[in-house]
Image (cartoon, rainbow, N blue to C red):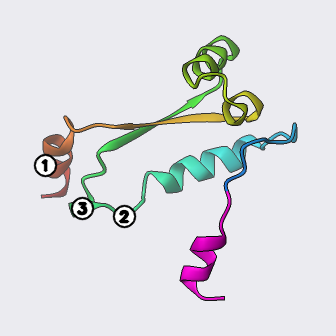
Amino acid sequence: MNFFEIVNKRRSVRKFTKESIPEDVMRKTLSISLQAANSSNLQPWEFYWIRDEDKKQQLVESCFSQSAARTAQELVVAVSRIDTWKRNREYIF
């Protein structure tokens, strides 16, 4: 199957099992997420792993109580930070 066939046949899972995700897997996933390729390696993002149950519930409500948020064992919020590009540029140059 070529790339375009794969893209056309892909489906998003919107309901999850109760199987837990090991903490080391979550930490590795977040770590490699921070290294994703981007323009000039400025990395204008932050990831927040929501672990507090009250905050998770608030986040589920913010997601309109959709099944994907409600049934996920872990919730991560990705935030685009357009205010950090100058600081990050200084780290590189």
Give the mark toward the camera: 2 or 1. Answer: 2
Residue at the spot 28% in from the left edge and 37% down from the top edge: 81
39 sits left or right of 16 in the view? left
Percent of width and height locating residue 77? 51, 34
* Quadrant of the snapshot with the C terminus: bottom left
Q: Looking at the picture, which amino acid does disc 3 mark? A: Ser
Q: Which of 28 and 84 is in front in this view?
A: 84
Q: Going from the N terminus, do you reach mark 1 or mark 3 first?
A: 3
Residue at the spot 16% in from the left edge and 41% down from the top edge: 87
Question: What's the CA distance linking mark 1 and mark 3?
Answer: 15 Å
Residue at the spot 62% in from the left edge and 77% down from the top edge: 6
Q: What stretch is highlighted in magenta?
A: 1-11
Residue occupied by mark 3: 39
Residue occupied by mark 1: 90
* Quadrant of the snapshot with the N terminus: bottom right
Q: Looking at the picture, which amino acid does disc 1 mark? A: Glu
Question: What's the CA distance linking mark 2 and mark 1?
Answer: 18 Å
Magenta stretch secondary structure, dominant: helix
Q: Looking at the picture, which amino acid does disc 2 mark? A: Ala
Q: Which mark is residue 37?
A: 2
